[in-house]
Each structure stands twice: as structure tokens, then as C-alpha cells.
Amino acid sequence: MSELVDLKVKEHQDLFPMLGTDYVEFYVGDAKKAAYYWMRTMGFQPLAYSGLETGNQDTVSYVLRQGKITIVLTGSYHPDTEVAEHVKRHGDGVKVYAITVEDARQAFAVTTERGAKPFMEPRVLRDDHGEVVLSGIYTYGETVHIFVERKNYEGIFMPGFELWDPPFRFPEMGFKYVDHAVGNVEEGKMVEWARFYENVMGFFNLLTFDDKDISTEYTALMSKVMSNGNGWIKFPINEPAPGLKKSQIQEYLEFYGGPGCQHLALATDNIIETITAMRENGMEFLEVPDTYYETLEARVGKIDEDIEDLRRLKILVDRDEYGYLLQLFTKPIQDRPTFFIEVIQRKGAKSFGKGNFKALFEAIEREQARRGTL
Ligand code: FE2
């Protein structure tokens, strides 16, 4: 059964200094339209651009920001780029989870020495604003971690990018930081990838869920939450567990063509305002049955929010020993039923909404049944 490691007791040191999430990059079929979607439905602000006009002959990237969250959306001008190949195999999806480090050369040396497969040898990018050092390693599937050393850089994003300042903008929606990023891996591979994060990256196992924690009549999964030392970067790893019907993780693996990032949890400090704005601007969410709210107060006790607001917006609530959290999950945000967004507001809670898994999975199964993939 699950057990949350007490962070105060578990004083964990990183193998090399990790300063947080730097950016998350998606490879997409059409970066221009994807950028508009992230602005319109989630309130991201335009920041930087790279493409033909900046001398980039092969790929085009739009960089968006809100709070501490930086999203890069990259498309391809030609069929023979790594980006185009990736999109052909996986559809739109997360390629890069970038981590800000003190020293990108050190991060590369430490992780590859410990067995990581190299993705990018350390390289220095320079412009008038200074220099950025990048290096990268593979994680599950074709997903990579890029280590970004930007302490000697004062530009808007990175050399090769120019300011992107379009005349249209949509208001921010309250997003502050990336809370966690979840990976789906094949059945039997969860422990292997948890060990990768332990041995290669120096993370520790914050929490484990087995199929008794996370199962419904039809589907089951297991999950291990890996965290870096200071707790700023958290990567839960899911694998499908056998159920009566097809697990949502299995559905992901089939449509994505292998392991990959299942969802990003983005934190807000006012989930009611955030979800209201997202719904008004066209984001679609998983349906939560009204019956969920009938037992809510009995299950989670007193909360600051009005239950009627939560019922109207279909926001989920869960409590652990430290406090409570509010969360809600979007439907997949691209054609394939793969990647989605979690919106989360933490009010003390350090866990991941275990009490909501059953309600959530039943909602996902209703969607799977409609897709004919259950
Ligand atoms: Fe999550």
C-alpha cells in the first residue's frame, strides 16, 4: 500500500545541483496552431520564437510562459527532420523535459557515467546576451532530459530565439509552476525506470501505489513517484496492471507507439478561477459524476471552497495527513488519446489525489468506451 516518505526525515542530497524545471518541449504537427491553443485555453503568454526568420531552416519553435512554466512547441518545415519523424511515430507529445542545473557538463558526466544513454553532448550556445550550456540524456521511450545551465545568460530564452510579441494576447489563468510530470512505461518496466531515476539521476522514491490502490472493475495501474532531493522535480512512473479490460496506460502505449509523458500537472493558486477561465476558453475536461459531490464533505472534511462551485466546475478534492488538494484533468489535448493536463492546487497536501483515482478512472473508462478502446 502507499506510504508517503516524510521529506523532513528523508534528507536527500542531489547528485548534482538541480534548480528546477527549465522548460517542457513538445514536438507537434503544427507549432503555430498549437501555440494558439496553449494561449487561448490555458492563458500562456508569448515569449520567444525560432524559425525561418531567425535562420532556422529546419524547425520552428514557439516559446510560451506563465508563472515559472515555460512551454516550447516545435514543428518541422520538412519531412526529414527528427521532429517530423517523432510526430509521425507518436503524434504530438512531450520530447524534452528540461532541468535547470548549475553545471550542464557535470550533469552530463555524472549521469552518463552512471549508465544514462547520451542524447546531446555538452554544447555551448552564445549570443549578445551571454551563453547557455546544454547537454542531454534519454529517459523512457524517445523522451529526453536536457540539462540547461543558464547562469551566464540574460536573454529572453536561449540563443537562436528572438522576442515573440504578437499583437494578440489572452489573460493569464493563474498557473504558477510544474507540480509533476508523469511517464507511462510498459508493463513490468516501472521498477526499472524508478531505478533509473534513483541510480542515474539521484532521485528517491517518494511514494508507491500498487494495483490495490489504483484499480476499478476494469483497469488497474501501478505507480512510483520519484523526486529529486529538494522535491522541486517529481516524476511519477506508471505501468499498466492486468485488468478485465484494457488499461488506460495500455491505451496510451498503443496510441503513442511506446512509453512517453502521460500528463503534466500545472499548479494554480486559485483552481476555481483557473478552471472557470479554461472552460470559458474551450478546454475540455473529464466528466465527474454529480454523485461524487454527495459524499465529498464526509470524505475530506471542512474545506475553504464552496462545494457548489466545485460541483459546478467538476473539481476533485482529496486529503492526506498534511492537508488537502484540488485537481482536475483535461481530456487529451491532441488527436491521439495520449497526453493530457492536470490542474492542481495544493493546500498543504503533498500527495497526488489517491482518493480520486477511482472516480477519475471511471471517468476515463467512459471516454475509452466511447472511443471503442476499452
Ligand atoms: Fe498527476
Image: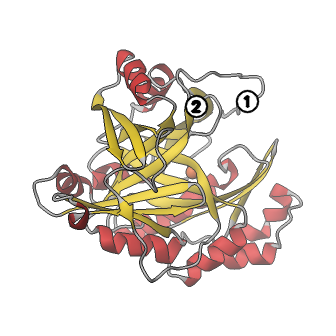
Q: As rendered, which of 289 and 66 lies closer to the eye?
A: 66
Give the residue displayed 69% in from the left and 51% down from the top.
355
Image coordinates for residue 88, horizontal then vertical, percent: 19, 57
From the image, tell me which residue sits under label 1.
Answer: 7
Identify the colour scheme used: secondary structure
Give the residue displayed 34% in from the left and 34% down from the top.
136
Q: As rendered, which of 259 and 35 lies closer to the eye?
A: 35
Image quarter (top left, top right, bottom left or bottom right) of the N terminus: top right
Q: As rendered, which of 361 and 52 lies closer to the eye?
A: 52
From the image, tell me which residue sits under label 2.
Answer: 228
Amino acid, disc 1: Leu
Q: Is residue 314 above or below residue 182?
A: below
Image coordinates for residue 173, horizontal then vertical, percent: 61, 72
Give the residue displayed 11% in from the left and 59% down from the top.
79
Image coordinates for residue 342, horizontal then vertical, percent: 56, 59
Q: In the visual, does 10 lie left or right of 175?
A: right
Residue 89's tag is none
Q: Secondary structure at mark 2?
A: loop
Please tell me how crowded label 2 is: few (under 14), some (14-19), or many (20+) other residues with Cα within 10 Å: many
Image coordinates for residue 18, horizontal then vertical, percent: 55, 32
- Closer to the chain start, of discs 2 and 1, is 1
Q: In the visual, does 48 lie left or right of 355?
A: left
Q: Is residue 135 above or below residue 111?
A: below
Please tell me how crowded label 1 is: few (under 14), some (14-19), or many (20+) other residues with Cα within 10 Å: few
Residue 75: tell me if it is visible.
yes
Q: Secondary structure at mark 1?
A: loop
